[in-house]
Image (cartoon, grey):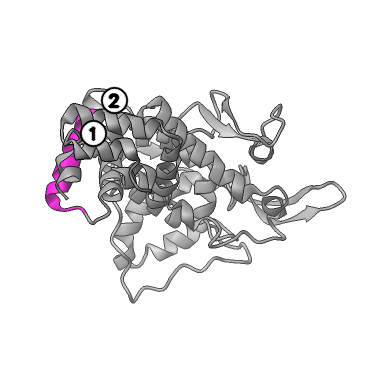
Amino acid sequence: LSHFLWSSLPDHTLFQMAKENRICETTGLQKEVERLLEDPRSESFVQGFSESWLRLDKLGTMPPASKKFHEYYRYGLKEAMIEETHQFLTNAVKENVPLTDFIQSDYGFINQDLARHYGMKGIEGTHFRKVFFPENSIRGGLLGHASILTLTANGVDTSPVIRGIWILESILGTPPSPPPPDVEPIDPDVRGSKTVRELLEMHRSVQACADCHAKIDPYGFPLEYFDPVGGYRPTYYRSRFWKNSTQSTKLFPSGPIDGSSILNTGEKIHGPRTLKRVLISKKRLLAQNLAEKLMTYGTGRVITLRDKNEAKSIAQSVILENLGFRDLIIKIATSEAFARK
């Protein structure tokens, strides 16, 4: 329990409860989970679980091109991006937010550097604070976080495939099959004569690729409105560079972005907002995926079919009873699977 929520050894209170065998009682265990979550040491859970679930540890492994995305380095956006997501998860634990907040929320945690990056005015200071987004904002939820949008890009350009796979794996828990070993990867058209959508259409002409890409790509296309560092772009750019005289990025527009798609389940999507609405309609998949991710992280092992069934039952109860993220953590920590192994 201590390693799950603190990433450290138990304290005296927890040792004493175990010694007196009170930790085995359901009510006693639940109270201890609550106490550990209230302790500042639970921040270790936020950091560890964000890496395990969201793959936040991948941010920076493919750093953005320094000349094209100078602002990423000038304003220390990598650290700000990570802090935004950490504070969002910390709030989810503390306030017991609905699981759907991970898909769409009307709030976020940003400072002046991220506000500048997001095109928001009136936010001064390097400290992070909770802000509420306008009703028509494309921010809110994890898919509006620059951290997620950057780690699902390659530092130079975006790929609907990578972002689509991330949604299937991290949000819905329905990862696609790995690609056949004899299929060539998609090479970007550096001359810009073909759009990403056109390149993927050509790729899907290979029958071995068609089925998987029909499942993956429609989730990624709506996020093309975000550039490789998570900034909003109304169009593609044939080039961009930092201009010292104006202390800003000079942009040279190219072709328009088409963020529309049709999921293999039939839903039509026109951009990030409609994508989020569709994902909210699939909240049962999100709940089950989160339950399995928490169980895997908490037990430190590959979960079995029996564990998966228990996780599914827990997820269903969370949805039916309109419970929140903190409730889900408590249910996992007090589950049979967690206690058994």
Front one among 279 and 61: 61
Residue 125, quarter of picture: top right
x and y, in percent, of residue 168 in the image: 34, 49
Q: Residues within 10 Å of mark 2 (few under 14, many from 20)?
A: some
SS at badge 1: helix
Three-letter amino acid code at disc 1?
Lys
Q: Residue at (56%, 33%) from the top-left corner?
A: 109
Identify the residue shown where x is 46% and y is 29%. 105
Position of residue 176 relative to residue 312, above or below, is below
Q: Residues at badges 2 and 1 in contact (C-beta under 8 Å)?
A: yes
Residue picked out by circle 2:
323
Question: Is 310 covered by the magenta stretch?
Answer: yes
Horizontal arrangement in the rendering, residue 285 relative to residue 119 (left or right): left
**In which quadrant of the rendered view does residue 44 lie?**
top left
Tell which residue pokes out farthest to the bottom in this image.
Answer: 182
| Residue that numbered label 1 is attached to | 331
